[in-house]
Image (cartoon, coloured by chain):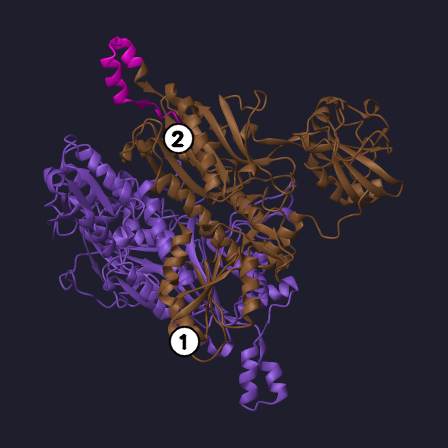
Chain colours: A brown, B purple
Amino acid sequence: MADAPATPPVMEQIVALAKRKGFIYPASDIYGGIRGFWDYGPLGVLLKNNIRDHWWNWMVECPPIGPDGEIVDMVGLDSAIIQHPKTWEASGHVAGFNDPMVDDKETKERFRADHLQAIFFLEPSPEMEIGKSYPVSADAPAADSIPHATVIASGPGEAASEIIANKAVRKLLGIKNVLSNMMVGASLGAPDYVTLWVESSRGNRYVYIRNIGQQFLAHGYEKTPSPYTAKAGALTEPRAFNLMLDTYPGPIRDESNKAYLRPETAQGIFLNFKNIVDTTRVKVPFGVAQIGKSFRNEVTPRNFIFRSREFEQMEMEFFCPPDDALKWYEFWKGERMKWWLSLGVEPSRLRFRDHDADELSHYSKATVDIEYRYPFTDPDYGELEGIAHRGSFDLTQHQEHSKQKLDYFDQELQLKLKEQGATPEEIKQRSRYIPNVIEPASGLTRAVLVLLCEAFTLDASRPSGVYLKFKPKFAPVKLGIFPLVAKDGMPEKARALYMELRTQFACEFDVKQSIGKRYARMDEIGTPFCVTIDGDTMSSDIVTIRDRDTQEQIKINISQVGEYVRERLK
Amino acid sequence: MADAPATPPVMEQIVALAKRKGFIYPASDIYGGIRGFWDYGPLGVLLKNNIRDHWWNWMVECPPIGPDGEIVDMVGLDSAIIQHPKTWEASGHVAGFNDPMVDDKETKERFRADHLQAIFFLEPSPEMEIGKSYPVSADAPAADSIPHATVIASGPGEAASEIIANKAVRKLLGIKNVLSNMMVGASLGAPDYVTLWVESSRGNRYVYIRNIGQQFLAHGYEKTPSPYTAKAGALTEPRAFNLMLDTYPGPIRDESNKAYLRPETAQGIFLNFKNIVDTTRVKVPFGVAQIGKSFRNEVTPRNFIFRSREFEQMEMEFFCPPDDALKWYEFWKGERMKWWLSLGVEPSRLRFRDHDADELSHYSKATVDIEYRYPFTDPDYGELEGIAHRGSFDLTQHQEHSKQKLDYFDQELQLKLKEQGATPEEIKQRSRYIPNVIEPASGLTRAVLVLLCEAFTLDASRPSGVYLKFKPKFAPVKLGIFPLVAKDGMPEKARALYMELRTQFACEFDVKQSIGKRYARMDEIGTPFCVTIDGDTMSSDIVTIRDRDTQEQIKINISQVGEYVRERLK
């Protein structure tokens, strides 16, 4: 068995680099932070804006050619974060946007019942080998169906690594070190079925972790030991916890003025469906795209910016005739995967996952997730974007609650039906309908996380030890502009180049420190190109361009630098 | 005296156009709206993004050359809307961000005491002429110091037009029509001193309106008649109403988890001062720029998007050595005015207004507003951007409340002092300091309002009756691309041009309706250029370009269209 690795897990390194280089800081850091909130620093905001602009370009400025060969009709929107509270009654969020929550009566800790994990110690068993999988009865409710296992404790959390990182759990189990991990169980797709090989106060043991949230919800709370104290009978009954943050706009604070911070941008689009149809030239099928902040009062925010309480979304609602909905669903599924690949994400770390029938919202006819292999889910995948066929659910709900007609009269369909010889009755019936909706919904802040994970590249041969291999188009800074030394006219010449090029793409002009240190710093923040102004430049306008990935240096004329970089940003 | 004008006031026309053409909709329109919240529609979001990008470009991408000839050091930031509640204790917002609020006990109406207006009828007096100004004692507390005046009622509101638009006030005064308005009073700068010439049930009369909010606060509430019923003794004592919206993040809803939606983005910058100094290459003096949503629970949101409860800000905090603060204050004052002019705003509608000593926040050493002559303040001006010299107030407060050192060691100043022969004691004392802050703070949504007001141009000679004269760079759509007729290969040729040019700037491709109607529509949304593909194009690649402002049409080769437009967007 191997020793515990000397370096921290990749995810911790990414979080540390993100703070150290000014990508992402914990919000209110000087006040000890505020859980679930993050600030995007000088480089983080540039990275985020680059992704934002790329999505907006694909969706609104240059929408794709649709399956019928026509340019897809698309407009943008920026609706308010706070909307009329009836919005969320109609959408189902007031009644249904809940997580089941459990308290430890003694410690007052609160956690999600459906994230409850059972933790077992397994005696080292000669027939088990690291790296191999063993069948474990998937519905085993307790220890007795697992050989050599003892229920020690339960813990809140989604991934095994989180459970084991939990201080209360470590203390309960006497775990000193995680030596290695291996997968056990028939369902490798579920991250809950994980066995770790640990050094504990009882000697080296396997720890087997599985999600018992569903069983817990079904069988009650009395028998389950508290994840914080291991005491039975310490947990409260699970109760519904609404994930919407509320507030009271207006001068009078009463229930009639209670409003919510939107948990998704989508509803702002549905509310404006009628206004957009009435005031612009769009005709069904068309899409409305929106980027903006949303808020969810996650019980346990986790995994850096993956699950935070304030986050930024990129959502598009595509309104189409009911008969064409499946065609558009397939179309957007393909388009969205193309978009993620266009960010430079390694294809093997992306996958589609169709929702099972029991996962689907009651109104959804089909939903697929685009998933990414995050360092904290590896070897499994985690949610990145959902593409949902929402039927006519949303507009129907808002029509009922607002008493405003939200149906659509389809003139083209009417003509088509006439040509096809349909009866007047049929034409009347079919050419007025509530559009169906296909919704590709992704997180802008989650996209930032993915690009940071993708870019993070350890390289012991470099002074920086690590570099960020962003696709040049998304790098916060495209070009570092450096005079070799701070004299002999070089700073002035470099500054003139900076003044010229900064109007075209993001440049950084830096005079101080050795050129090696400046390159190392550019590696760490993912700047794809550096140009150095040296003696050759002063005598013959020749500059050195250094490539971040290959570390190769070539010489070109100073007048060609702009084009050199522009070519590589396409 | 003239009759009441047949058309509604300009502001109402702008609001109507903004909705009709998809710039700005009332939020939650289908649910009857939610007061103080607005949605930016397909064109509004493009206009807003254009202004946003222009500000970001001036501030972060291409910051100006400072007064010392050096490029100003500037970075961007995007901090969370929800921060640790101690933030707002330190900033003074929990204790001091209040408006004095008064209720009418009978009608339950609530309004700001400091906006209370006294309304007098003046008998028509032969010596008064419309268009002339008359001295009125500025501190007149009641009717007796004004000749021929009778106190009739008081009303809540900021501008005379609002008071008179108030239904309760109109009913109380029996006002049928506002026939004309004239300024009376020594201080033309204060919009409260306004006289209107009205047709009322008592015949034509002057109505004189002045703000008595301060007297009201000083002399008590019992004597003042209610602005809704004219009854004395109907108003409650004014009490402090905090303008921050609050919410409860986290699983437990108690006072310790109470947090606020930020009322300004600025504090997020102060919280990150230390992180930014520690993790980036900036050195004092430097600025941090941020764009984002803020929330203020205005008692009476008003004037379209001018004063709303959710709005978007563009704020920059410039950290500098205390000794240089006034120099930087003057610098940013000039830069910010240049920026507003760069939007194409008519210079005569912009002005500086220095805050009087009694207006200044207790910590501010100087503050100037850039004001704009809005249609609803005309002939007066209203707030647009504030440029404040905040001293070291903010960092000092956060240092005290967070117990984190927020001072700065200025290496360059240390060197300079050494060269100047300062004593070691003096060098030590002066080279470590808490930076002073110059803050240019403006509203992105307010900038949208200004550009809509600026662009709105009535022109009876056009089919549209009105056009939006945006500076081309800020127009939501830059180029309309139209086939003259929907046949003979013209749509295909126009579409090919659209596909080529949409990657460079915002284009709209439209096939339907007569060319005149399409031009009229482009006028109404402010598209500066239209290109028409006609028979000449099919035979010899010649297209017609139409200019929105001059309505002139010229013919150029289709291959030159892109450059033609690009040249005019610079």
Corner quadrant of residue B441: bottom left
Q: Name the residue nearer the viewer: A7 or B231.
A: A7
| Chain name for mark 2 | A
Identify the element where label 2 is drawn: strand
Marks 1 and 2 close (CB-CB < 8 Å): no
Seen in the picture, residue B106 relative to B379 is either above or below; the reply is: above
B136 inside magenta stretch: no
Classify residue A63 as left or right of residue A230. Answer: left
Residue that mark 1 sits on: A538
Residue that mark 2 sits on: A318
Corner quadrant of residue A561: bottom left
Q: Position of residue B53 (x, y in %)?
A: 37, 54
Per the rendering, the mark at residue B521 is none
Q: Position of residue A416 (x, y in %)?
A: 25, 17
Residue type highlighted by circle 1:
Met
* Mark 1 → mark 2, Cα distance in angstroms: 57 Å
Q: Earlier in the sequence, mark 1 or mark 2?
A: 2
| Chain name for mark 1 | A
Q: Residue at x 11, y 39 (%)?
A: B539
Q: Magenta segment, which residues?
A: A402-429
Q: Position of residue A121 (x, y in %)?
A: 84, 34
A426 inside magenta stretch: yes
Identify the element where label 1 is drawn: helix
